[in-house]
Image: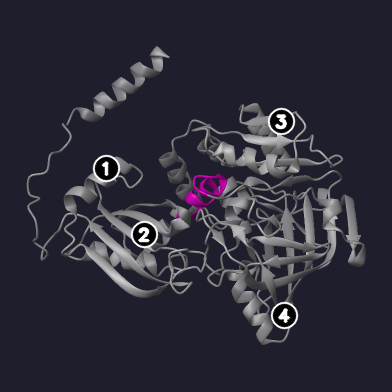
Amino acid sequence: MAYDDLRSYLSALDEAGQLLEITEEVQAEPDIAAAANATGRIGEGAPAISFRNIKGFEHAHVVMNTMGSWQNHAISLGLPPTTPVKQQIDEYIRRWDRFPVSVERRDNPPWAQNEVNGEDINLFEILPLFRLNDGDGGFYLDKACVVSRDPEDPGHFGKQNVGIYRMQVKGKRKLGLQPVPVHDIALHLHKAEERGEDLPIAITLGNDPIITLMGATPLKYDQSEYEMAGALRGSPYPIATAPLTGFDVPWGSEVIIEGVIEGRKRELEGPFGEFTGHYSGGRNMTVVRIDKVSYRSRPIFESLYLGMPWTEIDYLIGPATCVPLYQQLKAEFPEVQAVNAMYTHGLLVIISTKKRYGGFARAVGMRAMTTPHGLGYVKMVIMVDEDVDPFNLPQVMWALSTKVNPAGDLVQIPNMPVLKLDPGSSPAGITDKLIIDATTPVAPDTRGHYNQPVKDLPETALWVDKLTAMLANRH
């Protein structure tokens, strides 16, 4: 099922029993973030949560954790909620191969119902804002998609980026935005500033789940997130034209904020509780001036809690990191079987592969670190054999405990780039990276004694199916 907006997705979650309405009156702080934090601590199948009765706010509607479980992630892809994680990622890969799917441009977007311009803009009146962690330096927009264009090639549809970047609300019409250097918006901003220009942007709040997934996915620079969204949802993605910038934005968004990143201007931003489970300190970040806001009447404000994993951001980012890394590695190394990059944005990645010759697995691990995403994120790679499922952690632990000899299977690469938010980097943004080769050595690498492996009995697969069917019938 394809969702054209956040509201239709919430209805689908509700029909599946995956949307919990909180009817009691709550405090904006700390209740909303604390409840979202709790969804990551109550086990499998955590629902989305909806708040309509928030003290001090009139007509506010806040939703959290809309993708914060594998059940919700499956629903976002139009799959049954019970679809196993590995099957969700396999389906993600299958749909990826449909790319590109042309967009559908629509008129009369729901976000055009109201507009505010210039000095009349006051985000504190339009949005029900609250802090996510008690050490945060202010209110944040952390689940908005930001649209920007390449200033040197603004007509190239594929170079129009849709990405998710955290933004601190610093005034009625002022934001602080963090453009991580490895992300496309940083490239756009660099080009604009070299030309002595501001960078126009459109910020879209309250989106359907597929474009949110795409905003979190490290596509190639000239791959359109909208055309990939069409591939994932199985139908053309609906877009509309933002009235001030002329940018392409999701047709079904709740709020569209347009303005510019002011060239060569930086101000203190932060601290902020990060996906790494640590706070980032205050840093000089870019400044956004808001010039126009368009919004639905009584818009739904969507945010996500992030902190010590797992939280919603891990469900959102995990598969969206596994799939592009797999596709990029598979194109160069057909031997690659699967990629599990679900741990902390892919700071740790587990890759299964066949080997052509000795040292091959380590070369694949090195390539993972030099993909567009890997340059900023992939800090550690565990390489395993093709018969080890990287999503099955007991199998991975077995490979680590029996296949690794630290004398030759640990490859440490000094002074490599990583995003500055990695608390282990020193100085910030520089780290040693590590490849752990937990594969069986092949010639000419003849170390160890691996010539008598225990294999599953030939009949085991049949018995797996039989026992699974018997258990299902019993329930």
Q: Rounded to the nearest whole Å, what is the CA distance between mark 1 and mark 3?
A: 40 Å
Locate residue 2, reporting x and y percent.
Answer: 64, 41
Q: Rounded to the nearest whole Å, what is the CA distance between mark 3 and mark 4?
A: 43 Å
Which quarter of the figure is the C terminus placed in? Answer: top left
- What residue sits 69% from the left and 33% below the top? 11
Q: Which residue is mark 3?
A: 22
- CA neighbours of label 2 inside 10 A, class few (<14), some (14 to 19), many (20+): some
* Numbered disc 4: secondary structure: strand
Q: Rounded to the nearest whole Å, what is the CA distance between mark 1 and mark 4?
A: 50 Å
Locate residue 52, reporting x and y percent.
Answer: 78, 35
In the image, residue 421 above or below residue 130: below
- CA neighbours of label 1 inside 10 A, class few (<14), some (14 to 19), many (20+): some
Q: Rounded to the nearest whole Å, what is the CA distance between mark 1 and mark 2?
A: 22 Å
Observer-side mark, 1 or 3, equals 3
Q: Is residue 314 rendered magenta in the image? A: yes
- What residue sits 25% from the left and 24% below the top? 463
In the image, residue 251 above or below residue 453: below
The segment highlighted magenta reads 308-321
**Extreme residue toward the right, this view:** 120
Q: Tell me which numbered mark, 1 or 2, is placed earlier along the sequence.
A: 2
Task: From the image, give the main secondary structure of the stretch colored magenta.
Answer: helix
Q: Which residue is mark 4?
A: 263
**Extreme residue toward the bottom, this view:** 195
Observer-side mark, 1 or 2, equals 1
Question: Left or right of 69: which side holds 300?
Answer: right
Observer-side mark, 3 or 4, equals 3
